[in-house]
Image (cartoon, coloured by chain):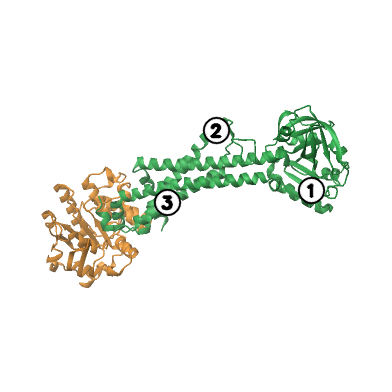
Chain colours: A orange, B green
Amino acid sequence: MARSLIAGSSQAGLSRGRPLAATSSRESVGMESQIIASLVGVDKVYESDGVKLKALDDVSLTLYRRDFAVLVGASGSGKSTLLNVLGTLDRPTRGEIRVAGVDVTTQSDNALSRLRLASLGFIFQSFNLVDVLTVYENIEYPLIIAGAGPAAARERVQWLMEQVGLTAHRSHRVTHLSGGQRQRVAIARALANSPALVLADEPTAALDSKTGETILELLNRLNESEQATFLIASHDQKVMSHAKRTIKIADGTVTESCGEEAYVYP
Amino acid sequence: MSIRELALYSRIAWRSVGRNRRRTALTMASVVFGTMALVLFGGLIDGVFLQLREYVIHSRLGHLQITVPGYREFGTLDPDKYSIKNFVELKSELVRMPGVVDVTKRFEFFGFLSNGQATVACAATGVEAEIDARTNTAIQYLAGAPPKPDQPAVSVGVGLAKKLQLKVGDNVTLLTNYGQNAVNAVDVDVVGIFESGVEAFDALAVNIPMESTRALLNVPDDAAHTVVVVLDETWRTEQVAADIRELAAGKNWPLEVQTWDVLSPVYYKVVRLFTAILVFLRIVVILVVVFSITNTVTMSVYERFREIGSIRAIGTTRRGVAWLFVLEGAFIGLLGGVAGALLANIPRLVLNGLHLTLPPPPVLTIGIPLYIVFEPAAVVQALVVATGLSVVASIFPARRAGRVSIVSALHAT
């Protein structure tokens, strides 16, 4: 029987839908082993027509296993830039960033692709799915390029579709789905390879409030069941109500990080 | 890259072909027309070569000619020395060879032809009239017919007939001082005026039956300057030439065997010209197809910036992204190529059915019937070229797609 987060979570790594990434480190004890990602003294400067704009200014931040952190800030405060550099989509101008134990600032483009594939999941405001693929195929995409075997990939996709409640839509093209359904496909895709860290940039901004609430509940459940760390950039108060931890950012600087002390891991 | 990954990219590329149907249709049209042009031009040129080949073979040359070595260089000075002396025995061996249809001998000599008022130089050929008429099916008789074997008559080239204002039934004198003999002459009737298609030849040519030739040249029955061999199929030429060389070596006969393509400068001149034209046309078609595909794939890259950003974000490498667009270009090329190769049959059948004649190629005066050959190998080649070109044309925009900044791509509208 497949597990269902909708019906209530259970332990990851059992029966069908076993996460494909190694999970042994999760059983380790000690704070050091619980650190999923860290930024130390990170700057990001954009230059346009000779004008320099500092989007991140000496940002230091640590994310722990099973964090459900919300990155809060006004528009233009640097939320997306922080997600981009942490997600290895962009390189910082200065500073050190480690994700899953890897110093991402020194890695080649191919190495970063492999890191994103294995250790990072992305959820975007506008879903960013592959339009010509079905629900099933979109979720299967990262599994295939990660080299998952057909049987394991099929099992994982089916389990994820059940978790996000889209089994009945498995053969539908994603362009035929509602916004909420598309975001659920994006969430399933982000979790396909059991990443250590999921980065979500305004995941509910394009959705109505009811659908947004459903999505946040889903993310909360997956945070527990997949033991993945979530960092969600948002300026939506409702998102903050789901957070275990709140990180405030203003003018490219982290001004407050509340709830970090609450993380105690067996 | 695993097969599953390649299959995934292929699936996306295949479905992406249909995303912007109007643009894909326009691009596909250029590939279709390009492939049609390649197949049709190729078929047309092959048809010209085929017909020209059979034309030169069946106008004068035959498939093979056998001479004594040195005959073509020195035969005019000392024709007896450079004559074949055992034609009857040679012919009896040749006719037994597989594929040999006819064997005939010729004497070639220069002389003068006079109509009583004027005398002009001519190049005469003594022929076995019956076999000559049977094998030289490409010679067109504008008036009269070839001379009969026992007829004291000649047929003359159209250019020579014009020079002497000859018509069928006129009496002429053929004069020659062949070899070391004294000057000799025969009075003969003009029974035919022919056109070989080669203007220079028609301005000098006289064909005279073997009986009159022997009387004029005083040559023995068993002698010949050249022995012409006609085969049932042209593709046998090289094999039969090798067999004859082997026969001559075995019998210790000093013989030289030359194939029709070596003997015909006309054929190779035309082949070189038409091949150059075909190369030029191919280059034009290739450029059109390449620019068209490059444009389409580039547009596709621009339209799918956001998608490129998202698949790069989830771990697709630059090479993986490039594969997507190369495969998309390849699919357009393959589809267009298949459609073009199939559709090319429509104009091919229509044009072949109209029985049109192409203007004469250089050095010929007779046009060649328009016939477009269907050559499966050429169709496969056109398909490979169309697909290959599409792949090549896609590489530049595909590489560009792979190098797109992920962040910029994700924020593209």
Q: Chain of mark 3?
A: B
Precedes in sequence: disc 3 or disc 2: 2
Circle 1 sits in a helix, a strand or a loop, which is it?
A: strand
Circle 2 sits in a helix, a strand or a loop, which is it?
A: helix
Residue B117: x percent and y percent? 79, 32
Q: Is residue B46 visible?
A: yes
Residue B365: x percent and y percent? 65, 36
Residue, disc 3: B393
Precedes in sequence: disc 2 or disc 1: 1
Q: Amino acid at mark 2?
A: Leu
Camera-side residue of B173 and A231: B173
The residues bearing labels 2 and 1 have C-alpha atoms spaced at a distance of: 42 Å
Quarter the N terminus of chain B occupies: bottom left
Residue, disc 1: B67
Camera-side residue of A248 and B132: B132
Estimate how packed mark 2 is, as few (under 14), some (14 to 19) or many (20 or more) residues with alpha carbons within 10 Å: some
Residue A202: x percent and y percent? 18, 54
Q: Furthest-front residue in view?
A: B117
Q: Amino acid at mark 1?
A: Thr
- Compared across the picture, whether B159 is left or right of B350 comes to right
Precedes in sequence: disc 3 or disc 1: 1
Q: Chain of mark 2?
A: B
Numbered label attached to residue B351: 2
Does the CB distance between marks 3 and 1 fall below 8 Å? no
Q: Chain of mark 1?
A: B
